[in-house]
Every structure is written in structure tokens, then in C-alpha cells.
Image: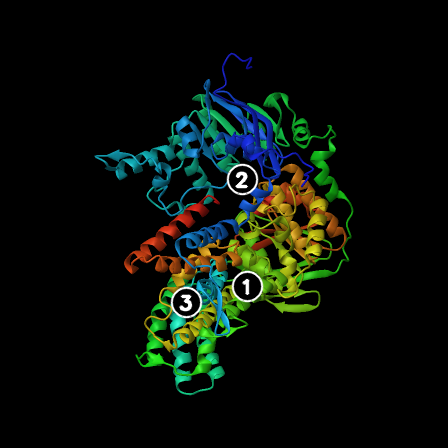
Amino acid sequence: MATAAVAPVLELSGIHKAFPGVKALSEAGLRLYPGEVHTLMGQNGAGKSTLIKVLTGVHAPDQGSIVMEGREIRPSSTLEAQELGISTVYQEVNLCPNLSVAENIFIGRYPRKWGMVDWAGMRTRASALLRELEIDIDVSAPLSRYPLAIQQMVAISRALNISSRVLVLDEPTSSLDEAEVQLLFRVLRRLREQGMAILFVTHFLDQTYAISDRITVMRNGEREGEYAAAELSRLALVNKMIGKPADAGEVDAVQATAEEARPEGAARVVLETRGLGRKGVLQPVTMQVREGEVLGLAGLLGAGRTELARLLFGADRADKGDIVIGDKAYGTFANPRQAIAAGIGFCSEDRKLEGAILSLSVRENLVLALQARQGMLRAIPMQRQRELAEEYVKALGIKTASIETPIGTLSGGNQQKVLLARWLATGPRLMILDEPTRGIDVRAKQEIMDYVTTLCKRGMSLLFISSELPEVLRCSDRMIVMRDRVTCGEYLRGDLDETTVLHAIAGEAA
Amino acid sequence: MTHPVAVPAAGAAPSGVAAAAAATQPGLAARLLAHPLARPLGALIVLLLINLFAVPGFFHLEVKGGHLYGAMVDILNRAAPLMLAATGMTIVIAMRGIDISVGAVVALAAAVACTMAAAEQPLWLAFAAALGAALLCGVWNGLLVASLGLQPIVATLVLMVAGRGLAQLVTDGQIITVYRDDFFVLGSGYLLGLPVALYVALAVVAAVALAMRKTALGLFTQAVGVNPVAARLAGIRAGALVFASYAFCAVCAGLAGLIISSNIKSADANNAGLLLELDAILAVTLGGTSLAGGKFNLAGSVIGALIIQTLTYTVYSLGVPPEVNLVVKSLVVFAVCLSQRSKA
């Protein structure tokens, strides 16, 4: 099969995997050569995660073979996969936050001396491993004390410590900032030189091209093709993922939607905050949101964007200031119910913890906010619930086996669409989207933003929070920049350009 | 009996993997087995079959003194308090809680009811006071869990200990015996040939089932149980619901206490409803509701209560010595729990 002189260290072929009602993988495959960084790309629901779970022993394939160094293997657990030399770092850091950094690195394989755990040796080795990643921290401190980026690095050094031939990184960069990404890449390049095969899953095109030797594109659970990174243009890659003929529109479509004319200037103010703040969380913020406008909130992680959204929605209680909606002054919201009653919807940045109710169905998740607003006693008739769910599944292009499928079995992007629909079903005047596109693919991003901006044209207002500056710039009519828990600038469409805003975010004189 | 789709015979597909993969259109038997009630019902049927062969006259029913009389009627009557306790416990557990004060609330309600009944107070007043006391207990539990944020098992432990002490205070440390015929109706009376207690228990179960179905209570309960944070952000009064679940559970326990004290015609602060909370938790588990909260199965809990009561009856009628009784019970429980384990 392989024409190259070097044999692949790992080859998956003809993998089939079905879940109840959904065919996740059919004829999927993957080849990994030693000393390469191989990127797996595809939209949400294309089967990337499932393929990785098959590879790492989480799911058993229904059909197909996994061959490692000439031997057929069939890992039945992640532990077994590890022992075979396949280490994985998952998208969400899955370590134990209450254990120390060193314990996390060595968990399950504590070094022993005289039959006892060799704590001192463990700490020394943990420090050494982390220093290889240019990180110098106290390894005896509990993991939870460190930011997510460091935790990610700990997860990687844990994977490295298990002397493995294959390293799988499932969206390792989604919680890292630029400098940390560069650090990660330096480490990956070094590992590549040592002959390790690295499988990298990401949604970021820039990163894909910065590090990859080869790219496998997946679509609808199948292997669309395998390409050398240098020979595949970005446009071609996006088209292969989406499965549409090459027209340059796709990539720039989001831009195009935003470019279209929107109601200007005179639109009336829908919501106003007057000195809304909370001690130790957010300095008083005064701002206005106009009808039909997309107001972007930019700033670094921790700058106060999410905090502002949560106070506005009553998820946390503000201790000063006023919220005025329409002509009505509400004071501050004590709980989300009051905010919802006033016509606000809020998609949290943490889909899993604060959004999806995983074991309930798509329909139940979708009607939840509307039902909560109507009150418990006025149950929405089942017929109406089904209609609503079917309607939004169609309108947003949600990929699900049926509306009765548990939302937990859907891919991230589709879950996000269901949660968006949950709020749209309540017909909000103001929709707050906090990082709505985190961890989801280009196509789903575009569909979500398209749909929301269409609603804005019909008068809904949108408060849009994203760490991806270009995205905020493209979509927003107006943008507020936040830094260190205080608003520090407001820009109208037109003055919006990346450098100015970057300066404001960074706090340099512009 | 013609079926439009050709379904292969069960024996024709020996390959487990292929069968599982092809099981997109499961047969009738498979669908029945996958039903959440299949296992608890199966366990109950097995128990009844054992009785059919081992306990002569188990299924014998006769009309005596104007009502039905027999082992099964006896089991239904005695299972009523447990059904009530299990119903309340199901709701609490569905919202990620647990209430281990049920037995103590039973004792307190029994003590209040018997003390007042013995003091020649009107019956309705005695019952209302007992249920009021139970409700107060529930409000206390709800405050500790929903408002103060204590862990449910610790919060209800307080009342588990204190409740029996309160009951002792009410009864002055005595066993209060009641000699009033109207007091016995609830626990030993019959209506249309069946025990009154059974009607009470079934009415409560039916009311809960109806509320779950006809209002959004079922959806909200599950949402809070699966993900309380997300439920609150979706606008559900998660805290109020959790609070209400404890209040309801305590009222159920109070009703159970009334039935128990009426049945034994007295209140024993030390022993009334002793360890009933554990039987209730067991009934909920046997019924297929996970202690992790979320999805719950009310009918399963009722069947679970019946399993426990039938088991007790069976063990006694088989002449197993009382010392061995608990061991037999634990073995059966172990077996049923193991059989539910695969549901993951």
C-alpha cells in the first residue's frame, strides 16, 4: 500500500463505526509516518473525534484494522493504547485538578523505590520534563493553581513521559494564547526530529500550515483525502472540508454578510447599562446597545468580557449600577430568570458546563428556556415542542439523527446550534453570545453567524464576545474594548482596524 | 402476524459485533428488554414465581369480613409506606440530592399524630399537625441544602439524628398507644375490598406522575438533576425546585408515618420507620434511577418498593431465621443491582 520508502508507524484503514441512529465513520483511515506532524481536519461531525477515540481505545471499531509497526492492534482502553505507545492529549484537559502537578504527570505510573512511592524522585523528574517544555513551576503545587495553558502543557508532558511512538493532540491550542502556541510548536518540532509521529487536530488554518507536514481531510465520516501540506492551498483545503466546488466565496462569506448594509445611526437604544459593576469583578460599565446592532466585545481572556455578560444576564449579581431596557429601569438582575423575562438570551462560553444538558434530548434542550419563561404550569404541548425543534433543526442545519437524540451525542458545533436555538426560541431582544464559535469549524461558525446576523437585520441586537479579533472585527457594527476589567475604548464600524484595536487591547498608546 | 421486514431469527446471528451493528431495527423482544422497567419488573416476577412454588397459598385470595384477604393484599398494604417514602426519595434523588432523615420524620409524624389522637383531639387536626410537622422538617432540609448549600447527606443527617429526639420529646419518652377506631382506618382499614393505605400511596404516586407529565415539572427536574448550572442559566428556578423536593419528600415521609402509626396503633419514637430511608433509597435504585441524578423512573421506584416488601414476606414465610433474613435480603439486592450495572 505505502509507496514511500519508510513504512508508516501507524495505519488505520477501512474503519467503520456506528452509534445508535448515526453512522459516525465509514471507510475512514489514516496513515502516520515517523517524524512527521500530521493534521487531521474536517468540519464538526466529520468524524475526527470518533476516529481518534477508535485509535486511542475509547471506542471499538465495528470494522477495519489498526496496524502499528506491522502488527495489527486493537486497543480496548486508553491505558492499553498508552502501553502500545499511543499517547493522547485531549481537547479538554482531563487531569485531576486536586492532585499536584508531579502526581498528574506520573499518575498510574508512580516511580517506586523499596516498594514505596519515590516522591522526591518523582518531583525531580517532573521538573525536568516540564523544563524541556520551557516551563519552570513548583511541581508539588496542586494543578488547579495554574492557568489552563500550563495545565495543557502538563497534559503534554504527561503524554511525553510515557515513552510513546505516536502522540495525538486533540485541539490542544484552543485554550492557549499565541506565545504558548509557539512554545507548543517548538516542542512539537523537537519531538518530530526525534522521530515521533504526531497527530494534530485543530480548527485553526494558520496553525495547520505552520506546523503540518501532511494533512488528512475528513468529511461525513470518510477520509476525503491525504495531502502534503505544501501542495494544498488554504482555499482548496476549506473546500475539501466543506465538500463544495471551489469558489472563493466560502472563506470570505462571513465577511460578505457583515459588509452588507445595516440600519444606520438613528436606531433606538434597546439596552443601556449605567455604571453596572461588581466589586472585584468588574469596574462600572456604562454602555448602550442599539436595535439591530452587533456590538462586539473585544479584549484578552480575563479582561472582563464574560464578567460583563454574566452581570448583564443576572448569572452573577451586580452590586452597583442600573440596567435599562426600553424605557424600563430594572436595577440589577438577581437571577437569569429576570433577565430572560426582560428579553435577554445568553449563550455561555462553557458549552458543556453551563449550556448543554447532555443526557436530555435535542428537543428538551431546545425548549428549555422558552418553557422556563412560560412557567412550569403552562407546559408547551408536545406537538408544538416537536414543531419548534424540527423548525430550528432545519433552519440552523443541525445534524442529528432525530430531535429525540440526546444532545450529548452531537458534535460540538451542532450542540452549539441547539443552544443558540434554545435562546432564539424565546425571541430575545438582545442576544449575548460568549465565544459562540470556540472549538467549532469554519462552516458551523459561518452558519451560526449568518443566522444571527439575519436576525439582527430584523431588529434583534447582538452582544458578541470572541477572542478571535478578526471575527469580532468582521461581524461588529460597533466594538467595545475591555482591558483589566474596565472598558477602555469604543470604536464605530469604519474606525475598526486591527492594529488600533490591538493597541487598545494591549494597553499601548495608539 | 405478517411482518413487512424480514427479521432474522435470534439464533441466526452468532457474531455479537455484527448483531450489535445491525441492531438499528431491534426486534420486539429486544425493545421490551431495553425498556427501563424490564429489569425491576423481571425481578418482581421472579420473586413471585419463587413464592408460587415455595409458599403454599401465596396467591390465594378470599373475601373475609367484607374485604380481600391474602398474602398479596398484605404485601400491598405493608408496602404502602415504603412506596410513599420511595416516591419522595425519587424526586430528591432525581435532583442530585438524598434525604436520610425519612425514618426520623416518620417517627416524628407518628409521635405528633398519636399524641394528639390520644389526647382526644379531632382526627383531622391530629393528622394535619403531623403532616405540618413533617413539612417543617422538609423546609429545614431544603433550607440547609438549597439555601445554605450544605451537602445533602450531611444536611439531612442533622435531622436524622435530631428528628427522633424531637419525637421522644413529643411522646415524653413513652410509647403512645391510641384506642380510637377512627385512627385505625388509614393503616388497617379497607375500601372496596382493598387497604386504604394502598389508595393513599397510589393517589400520591398518580398525582406526582400527572404533575410530571402534564406540567413542565418532569423536564425541569431532569434538567436540574443533569446540570444544575445550565438549568439555572436557562431560567429554571433550580434552587426553589431543590427546596421543594425536600419539602415534598418530608411530607411523603409524614404520610408514611401516619399509615405506620395507624397500622400499629401506637407511636414508638425509637423504632417507627427505623431505616426506612435506606429501604427507600434501595427501592429507587432497584427501580432503575441513578443516584447521580437526572433521569428518573417513578414507576420503577414503586416496583422497587414492592420487590423489597415481597422479599421480606418471602423470607419470613420460608421460615428463614430472622438472623439470616438480612443476609438473604442483601444478597438479592446485590444480584439486582449487578443486573442493572450494564446499563452504564
Alpha-carbon distance for marks 1 and 2? 30 Å
Give the quadrant of residue A137. top left
Image coords of residue B168 (percent x, y): 33, 77
Discs 2, 3 touching: Cβ within 8 Å:
no
Image coords of residue B291 (percent x, y): 45, 54
Residue located at (67% from left, 36% from top): B5
Residue highlighted by disc 3: B102
Q: Secondary structure at mark 3?
A: helix
Frontmost of labels 1 and 2 is 2
Q: Secondary structure at mark 2?
A: loop
Residue highlighted by disc 2: A174
Label 3 marks a residue whose chain is B
Residue A208, placed above or below residue A174: above
- Choose the circle earlier in sequence order: 1 or 2: 2
As drawn, which residue projects farthest toward the left? A114
* Mark 1 and mark 3 on one chain: no
Residue highlighted by disc 1: A318
**Looking at the picture, which amino acid does disc 1 mark?**
Ala
Nearer the observer, B18 or A255 = B18
**Looking at the picture, which amino acid does disc 3 mark?**
Val
Residue located at (38% from left, 35% from top): A130
Frontmost of labels 1 and 3 is 3
Label 1 marks a residue whose chain is A
Nearer the observer, A279 or B322 = B322
Discs 1, 2 touching: Cβ within 8 Å:
no
